[in-house]
Amino acid sequence: MIKLSERIEKLPGYPMAELPAIKRRLLEQGVDVIDVGPGDNDAPPPDVTLEAMNSAIRTPALSKYGFQQGLPEYRQAAARWVERRFGLRFDPTSELLPLIGSKEGLAHVVFTVADPGDVAIVPEPGYQAYLGGAILAGAEPYIVPLRREQRFLLELDQIPDEILRRARIVFLNYPNNPTAAVAPVEYLERAVAVCRRYEILLAYDNAYCDLTFDNYRAPSIFEIPGAREISVEFFSLSKSFSMTGWRLGFAVGSKELIGALTRVKSYVDTGPWLAVQKAGAATLDQAEALVEPIRAELKHRRDAAVTALREVGFVVEAPVATMYLWVALPAGIPSALFARRALEEAGVIVLPGSAFGPGGEGNFRIAVTVGAARLAEAVHRLGGILEQMRSGALARTA
C-alpha cells in the first residue's frame, strides 16, 4: 500500500466534488433537477469570444507551447483593461501574468513566499483554493471566521501579534464568495497598512469585480496607496464572460512578485492555451459592452430570488455584487442536512455553508445561474424543505 503524504491527508473534501455524479444519477431517474450550486452561469460566452476562438483554433502557431510568456496580445489587452477599469498601469511584460484561470494562480502564489511552518491567513467561509494552496505549500493555515455582524470582513488588526509576525500571506476576496460581501475603501486601507507593517503578501482575489449592481463599483486593491509593494491581484474571465470552462485569468503586481509567481508556474504548467488567450484578448478589448447584459440579467435574477426567498421564510439580504446569495438558516438546522434533503427530496442543488469550512455553518449558498422562473421554482421547493425541517426541530424541542 502506498502511503499518501501528510499534506494530502490534511486537504478537506472539495465542496463540489460529488455534485456532478449525484446530479447525473437524479437526471437518469427522471428528476427535474435545478442546479444553483456551482457558480457557472447558463449564458453562453459572447459572440466576439466565440468568433475569435473559432479563428484561433485554425491558426497552427496558436497550438504550440505558450510557456509563461503566453500571447503578448493577451497580456496587452489585459493591461489595457486594468487601466480602463481602475485607472492603473501595469507593464504587460513584467507586471502581468496569464493564468489557467485565477484559481491556479491563487493556489500557486503561496509557494512564492511561504516555507513550511510559515502562517497563511485564510478566511472561512472562503474559496477552497486558498486553504488548499496553503496546505500544499506546507504553510500553517490560520483560519479567520467571517462573521455576519462584522460584515464578513477579515479584520487583520484583530489577529494576535504572534500570528501576524509569522504570517507570510493573507487571502482577501471582495466582492466575496460565498457571502457576496463587499469591502469599503477604509477597510482595504487598514488591511494594506497591516500587511505593510508585518511584510505580509496580500493575495487579492477580484474575480467578481464586474458583477456589481445598484451603482456599486468594486475597487482594485492597487487603488489603495502602498499596496503595490505587498500585493498581487487576481482576475478571471470565468464569471464576467461565462467562460468558466475556458480557464483563463491573469495576475498583476510588482515585477518582483509577478516574477516569483512566474518562476513557480514554470515548473508546473506551460500557461493557458494560446488560442484561448487570443479569444481572451478580443473579449477584454470589448469587456465593458460585453459584461453589461450579463450584469443586468444577474441583477434581475437576484431580485427575483431575494423576493421569493423572503416570501417562503428565509432571511437574506440583496447583495450589491457577485452571482451569489448567502442565505441564513434558522438555528438548529444543519446546513449539510438541509442541502442533502433539498437535493434528494426537492431536486435542488445548493451548497451548504459548511462546505466552505465550519465558519460557514448556519447558511447555504444559491448561485443565480439559472433564469428567474427556475430560481423561483427552486426557492419554492426549498421553502417546503425549510418548513418540514423547522417543524421537525420544533417538535423535538416541544
Image (cartoon, rainbow, N blue to C red):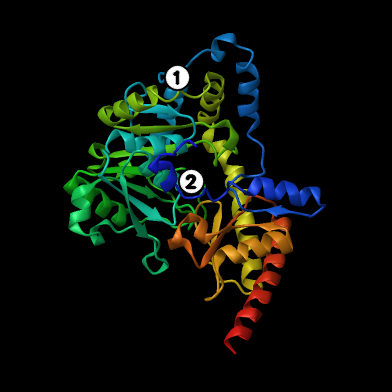
**Residue marked by disc 1:** 70
Q: Residue at x 39, y 69 (%)?
A: 149
Secondary structure under tag 2 reads loop
325 on left or right of 258: right
Cα–Cα span, label 2 and label 1: 24 Å
390 on left or right of 3: right
- Vertical arrangement, residue 151 with respect to residue 188, above or below: below
Rendered location of residue 340, percent (x, y): 64, 61
Secondary structure under tag 1 reads loop
**Residue marked by disc 2:** 208
Rendered location of residue 245, percent (x, y): 59, 34
Q: Which one is nearer the viewer's eye here, 319 or 135?
A: 135
249 on left or right of 92: right
Amino acid at dot 1: Gly
Rendered location of residue 72, percent (x, y): 43, 18
Q: Residue at x 25, y 59 (%)?
A: 159
Q: Badge 1: how crowded within 10 Å, few (<14), some, or many (20+)? A: many
Rendered location of residue 154, percent (x, y): 34, 57
Q: Residue at x 63, y 55 (%)?
A: 300
Q: Residue at x 33, y 31 (%)?
A: 89
